[in-house]
Image: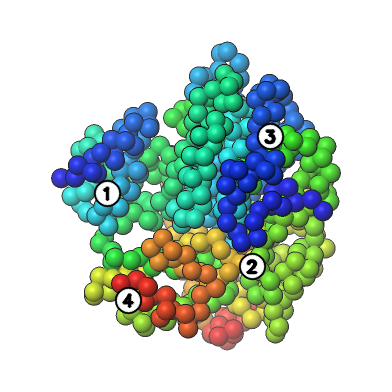
């Protein structure tokens, strides 16, 4: 069941568009904000609320990189793996994160604290390598800084 | 040297608020447009200024606006959209404009919307630009409060509502028709053209989609005139350009410069040359989907025609530098991985072709490739080239690949002969 808050926020988005379906991406964002990810049940509930089929909702949900169809940790680490970060050695940062947290891309730490994902160019190529944790951006990242950065997220 | 787009920005990189923006002359162009100019006059000035789209394609902005139906018989609802989905790998110019001076963009958008008589407007911003999202929402609120947005702007009969939409991550959203599908809540797949968005765009209504940097130029063109804008440049293209350099240079960064500075000037003077111990090997002039140029091209002017004549594209004007310590095969594998992942899957050549190219490149990089593999991927650069796919994603992906084979063939061969990456 969608919560009262979720319904209220989705209804607000529906008012801003010509027809209900057009609020789909916003609805997915709202439910993900409240629940962390989009489960099969969430797909059904959103579909019902917007008068669409679950398949149609899922086709959109699975299309976008930042809609999560599997549970994620409390904090999602988005590591830029695009070209300038490649030249500046993001692979070393990946390896260090992999060793420190014991997770590969797509995996979540056993304490559900972090999920590690690759991300397309974060648009700070002049200060590569770059990563985001939650909504925070880190640039010119070095392996030495990683412990200090990760400590902030408990 | 004038830097209209960036000269008023604060050195600490924080955004100008509405008061600070007004002090620099902000919203004077909007007042002038609303009080003294007809919409078509605005279109004419922008057309005469020779402003070309800064998102990569370089189409005349004024001409684009000119395709929108105008007058009493035109559709009542029209849209003006700012494409702020900056996701071209190696590109970081719009972030600067969005974070540093959001009101400059908003003013440009209001003037553009007025020019086509649109009453609704969106900033389509990629999710990852969190700071930009914050300052744009704040600036929109300020602009509404000041009467620059909303009903009856500055007491006129003209009304405009503007919203911030943050995307959920997909390179395809940068393609204007795919962006429209994303705004409509759908998968971001491209639409067939014609009809062009100027006639039938968002929700089937006339729509203009312009890049951030393009729209930021507009208030300055209104304030200073078409001739002034043309005189800013060092070449046949008009205005300034936000150029950038990333890779192993001493001072990677972005700078607003007259359009038409040379590649050599950018790398040597502005980016401070290559880092100690590294030599320049190749240049992607304008993002991941532009052809490589080399040290033979340092005199090439960074304007639309000059870069095209050299065999590449100006693209976004933010270059990525390949140094002699980085493997060109690994470099293009990274690019093809990106394009294969970001292909929307709508058309077969792109959906099927790019992952195969990525796999072949990986085997070459790992020393498992054969000489015929190089011919095979070279053949695919034609099969996935212009005219064979639904949109420009795969042809764009093929540009750095075909030129890498052309300029760095020996590096590919070395991987085959030595059965390993010589850069490891």
Q: Which mark is residue B28?
A: 3
Name the front one of labels 3 and 4: 3
Residue drawn 61% across and 78% down? B326
Q: Which mark is residue A103?
A: 4
Residue drawn 18% across and 50% down? A41
Which mark is first along the chain, 4 or 1? 1
Question: Is label 3 on the same chain as label 4?
Answer: no
What residue is shown with label 1? A31
What residue is shown with label 2? B246
Q: Which mark is residue B269?
A: none
Colour style of the rendered protein structure = rainbow
Q: In front here: B339 or B39?
A: B39
Question: Is label 1 on the same chain as label 2?
Answer: no
Mark 4: which secondary structure? loop
1 and 3 marks in contact (CB < 8 Å):
no
Q: Position of residue B42 (x, y in %)?
A: 70, 28
1 and 4 marks in contact (CB < 8 Å):
no
């Amino acid at each position: 069941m969608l919560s009262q808050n979720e319904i209220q926020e989705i209804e607000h988005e529906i008012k801003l568009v010509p027809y209900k379906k057009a609020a789909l991406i916003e609805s997915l964002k709202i439910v993900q904000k409240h629940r962390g990810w989009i489960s099969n049940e969430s797909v059904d509930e959103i579909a019902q609320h917007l008068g669409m089929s679950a398949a149609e909702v899922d086709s959109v949900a699975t299309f976008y990189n930042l809609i999560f169809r599997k549970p994620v940790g409390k904090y999602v680490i988005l590591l830029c793996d695009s070209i300038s970060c490649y030249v500046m050695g993001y692979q070393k940062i990946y390896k260090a994160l992999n060793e420190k947290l014991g997770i590969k891309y797509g995996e979540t730490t056993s304490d559900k604290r972090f999920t590690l994902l690759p991300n397309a160019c974060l648009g700070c190529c002049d200060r590569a390598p770059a990563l985001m944790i939650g909504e925070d951006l880190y640039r010119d990242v070095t392996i030495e800084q990683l412990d200090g950065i990760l400590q902030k997220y408990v | 040297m004038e830097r209209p787009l960036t000269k008023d920005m604060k050195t600490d990189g924080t955004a100008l608020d509405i008061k600070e923006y007004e002090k620099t002359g902000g919203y004077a162009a909007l007042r002038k447009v609303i009080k003294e100019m007809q919409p078509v006059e605005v279109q004419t000035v922008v057309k005469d200024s020779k402003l070309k789209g800064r998102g990569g394609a370089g189409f005349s902005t004024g001409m684009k606006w000119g395709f929108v139906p105008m007058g009493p018989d035109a559709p009542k609802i029209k849209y003006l959209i700012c494409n702020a989905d900056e996701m071209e790998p190696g590109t970081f110019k719009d972030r600067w404009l969005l974070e540093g001076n959001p009101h400059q963009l908003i003013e440009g958008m209001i003037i553009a919307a007025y020019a086509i008589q649109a009453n609704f407007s969106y900033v389509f911003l990629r999710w990852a630009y969190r700071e930009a999202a914050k300052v744009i929402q704040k600036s929109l609120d300020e602009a509404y409060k000041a009467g620059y947005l909303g009903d009856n702007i500055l007491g006129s009969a003209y009304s405009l509502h503007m919203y911030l939409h943050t995307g959920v991550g997909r390179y395809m959203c940068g393609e204007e028709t795919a962006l429209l599908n994303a705004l409509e809540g759908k998968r971001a797949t491209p639409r067939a053209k014609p009809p062009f968005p100027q006639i039938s765009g968002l929700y089937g209504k006339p729509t203009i989609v312009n890049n951030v940097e393009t729209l930021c130029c507009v208030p300055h063109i209104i304030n200073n005139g078409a001739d002034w804008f043309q005189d800013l440049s060092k070449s046949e293209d008009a205005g300034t350009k936000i150029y950038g350099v990333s890779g192993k240079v001493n001072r990677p960064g972005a700078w607003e410069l007259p359009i038409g500075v040379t590649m050599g000037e950018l790398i040597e003077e502005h980016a401070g040359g290559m880092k100690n111990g590294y030599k320049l090997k190749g240049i992607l002039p304008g993002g991941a989907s532009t052809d490589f140029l080399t040290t033979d091209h340092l005199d090439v002017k960074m304007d639309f025609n000059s870069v095209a004549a050299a065999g590449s594209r100006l693209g976004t004007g933010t270059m990525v530098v390949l140094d002699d310590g980085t493997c060109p095969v690994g470099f293009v594998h990274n690019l093809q991985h990106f394009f294969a992942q970001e292909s929307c899957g709508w058309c077969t050549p792109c959906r099927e072709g790019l992952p195969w190219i990525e796999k072949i490149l990986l085997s070459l990089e790992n020393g498992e490739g054969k000489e015929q593999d190089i011919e095979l991927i070279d053949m695919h650069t034609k099969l996935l080239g212009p005219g064979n796919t639904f949109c420009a994603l795969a042809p764009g992906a093929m540009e750095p690949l075909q030129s890498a084979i052309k300029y760095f063939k020996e590096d590919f061969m070395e991987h085959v002969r030595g059965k390993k990456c010589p850069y490891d």
